Image: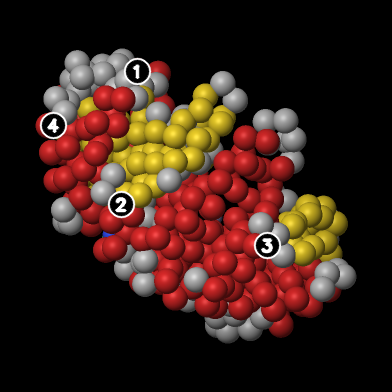
Amino acid sequence: RVLTVDMGERSYPIYIGEGLIDQAGKRFAEHGISLKSPILIVTDENIAAGNHLAHLESSLKQAGFTVSTAIVPAGESSKSLTVFQELVTHALQAGLDRKSTIVALGGGVVGDLAGFVAASYMRGIKFVQVPTTILAHDSSVGGKVAVNHPLAKNIIGAFHQPEMVLYDLNTLQTLPKREVSAGLSEVVKHGLIWDADFVAWCDENAERLLALDPEALGYALYKGCSVKAAVVSKDERENDLRAILNLGHTIGHALEAVAGYKQLLHGEAISIGMVGAARLAVKLGASEQVYTVTKHVLSRVGLPVRLPVDLDTDLIMDAMKHDKKFQEGSMTFIVPVAIGRVEINHSVSASLVREIVEQMK
Ligand code: NAD
Ligand code: ZN
């Protein structure tokens, strides 16, 4: 499958299929990646332990590219200015110039980090994404790249669109089960905000998705990327639209902050957040079905739909107040008014949110 993401004057293809890494050399040449300038592959130690890195290196070398590789520690802590600087050092020593390309082989962490190096090295060089997690379907569209500051996530960043995305479904076969479900959380989110038929499809095909069936995964990633692409490309005209991608994230971010980022993965936290938003929607007049369908599809793909009981409601409410969307006893919420359709509500009362948090334990 090929999807074209149209970002204003920039558009780029997302290829989704099996064995794409072995065709990387050919695709790079087709897309005008220069043979004369060195390429830097950035990946993490977990991915480097498998055979995908070796395949990518040999495919590019066979096509005549000069390739060097930087391996960073796995995990969010690599999205730092320290690792950023190490990568710039690596790029300089490997002789990367203005016509060079940086390739991210990995999940959202490697994508955001390598993308930010590509955005800033010599004021911006080419970037290619080779995502290896399901969650990375989200970060491969929209062009946001960033590293973290100790005081705030994703606060040092840029917009930098890739030349192309090569989504090789074979890489996903080694993903830990928990990461599979966490990634599917954002896939389901894209259905819940935009496409009721796709939500029904996710429900029917949950077993195939969890078993990493390539056909099912390919379709799910294609749909997830399509919805995100539709939202971010329209957002250039409708400024508020991009906010709908935050379904489940108001409660979700608060849970991550209170539970600690180890206890709850991002996808798990927003799963609980989406169920909370659905409960809220029902209180505000939506059909009960919004809640039952949301909860059902998320539990089918192996995600939590209740709050861990040991999380303190006061702490969760405090964490939400630090969210910029909170003011004077009312807050902004993305409310699923029907399956496949959301509205932005700027005046949800904090006491109602509190009631819902309590009920979800
Ligand atoms: P990740 O990159 O840390 O990957 C999760 C874990 O899986 C890591 O331990 C990694 O080493 C391992 N892994 C990756 N691919 C593997 C494979 N094929 N086989 C075995 N193990 C593998 O995390 P993620 O969930 O992919 O991404 C999270 C990051 O993405 C966050 O930093 C978040 O801020 C960012 N993000 C960015 C955007 C954006 O628009 N730029 C959108 C969503 C998320
Ligand atoms: Zn998210």
Instruction: Pick the residue in front: 119 or 358.
Output: 119
Residue 222 percent across, percent down from the top left: 49, 50
Q: Residue at x 34, y 18 (%)?
A: 122
Q: Give the Cα separation between the discs numbered 2 and 3.
A: 27 Å
Q: Which mark is residue 36?
A: none
Kindly check if marks 2 and 3 are in contact, taking CB atoms under 8 A apart as contact.
Answer: no
Q: CA distance from mark 4 to mark 3?
A: 44 Å
Residue 112 is left or right of residue 99, and the answer is right
Q: Nearer the viewer, residue 239 or 315?
A: 239
Q: Residue 196: which numbered mark, if any?
A: 3
Residue 291 falls in which quadrant of the image?
bottom right
Relative image position of residue 198 (x, y in whole percent): 60, 61
Tell me which amino acid carries mark 1: Met
Residue shown at the point (33%, 54%) measured from the top left? 169
Name the residue tied to disc 1: 122
> What mark, if any, has residue 61 been given in the picture?
4
Q: Which badge, 4 or 3, comes first in the chain's sequence?
A: 4
